[in-house]
Image (tube, grey):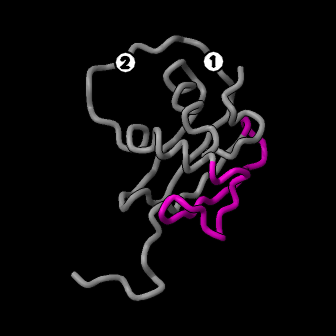
């Protein structure tokens, strides 16, 4: 296996977020690029520094959860927002969907709210 060509090396974080606030609502698209914990010039998230901190705290556990016993989740509804995060995080492929359909999903949403765009609905406020 050969190393990537100079200038084509993958970024430590290269994520695209597609966010809709409800059925039929417009889709917002954001990108987060970073290396060494520093946001890159192509980042379009409103607060990329906060997004990187959220990823530092919760990224591994949320993007790559360790299998375990089923979780009991409160049956509460937090809103119709849906976010899809794709790309790469620390050399691993990411494809995660976020919603606010129950207590467990709301907790995931809140943990990565800065990554999800920080606009109405993405804060997890209920």
Residue 29 appears at what percent x and percent y? Answer: 69, 55
Residue 52 appears at what percent x and percent y? Answer: 55, 50
> Is 64 placed left or right of 126 in the picture?
left
Position of the C terminus, as image quadrant, is top right
Rendered view: 87 above or below 120: below
Q: Residue at x 57, y 25 (%)?
A: 106
- Residue underneath mark 2: 71
Asked whether residue 24 is drawn in magenta, I would say: yes
Binning the other alpha carbons within 10 Å of mark 1 as few (below 14), some (14 to 19) or many (20 upward) gives some
Position of the N terminus, as image quadrant, is bottom left
> Is 61 placed left or right of 120 in the picture?
left
Q: Residue at x 71, y 42 (%)?
A: 118
Asked whether residue 108 is drawn in magenta, I would say: no
Nearest the camera: 49 or 82?
49
Residue 40 appears at what percent x and percent y? Answer: 60, 67
Please identify the residue farthest to the bottom as the structure is shown.
6
Is disc 1 placed on a helix, strand or loop?
Answer: loop
Nearest the camera: 30 or 36?
36
Q: Quadrant of residue 64?
A: top left
Rendered view: 78 above or below 34: above
Which residue range is magenta in the image? 21-49
Q: Residue at x 78, y 42 (%)?
A: 25
Is disc 2 placed on a helix, strand or loop?
Answer: loop
Q: Quadrant of residue 39?
A: bottom right
Nearest the camera: 99 or 23?
99
Q: Residue at x 51, y 58 (%)?
A: 37
- Residue underneath mark 1: 77
Please identify the residue farthest to the left as the structure is shown.
1
């Amino acid at each position: 296996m050969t190393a990537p060509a100079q200038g084509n090396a993958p970024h430590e974080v290269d994520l695209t977020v597609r966010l809709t606030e409800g059925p039929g609502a417009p889709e917002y698209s954001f990108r987060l690029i970073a290396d060494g914990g520093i946001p890159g010039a192509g980042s379009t998230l409103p607060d990329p520094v906060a997004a990187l901190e959220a990823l530092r705290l919760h990224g591994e556990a949320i993007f790559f959860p360790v299998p375990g016993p089923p979780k009991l989740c409160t049956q509460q509804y937090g809103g119709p927002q849906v976010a899809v995060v794709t790309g790469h995080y620390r050399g691993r492929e990411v494809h995660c969907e976020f919603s606010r359909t129950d207590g467990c999903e709301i907790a995931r949403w809140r943990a990565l709210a800065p990554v999800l765009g920080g606009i109405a609905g993405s804060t997890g406020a209920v």
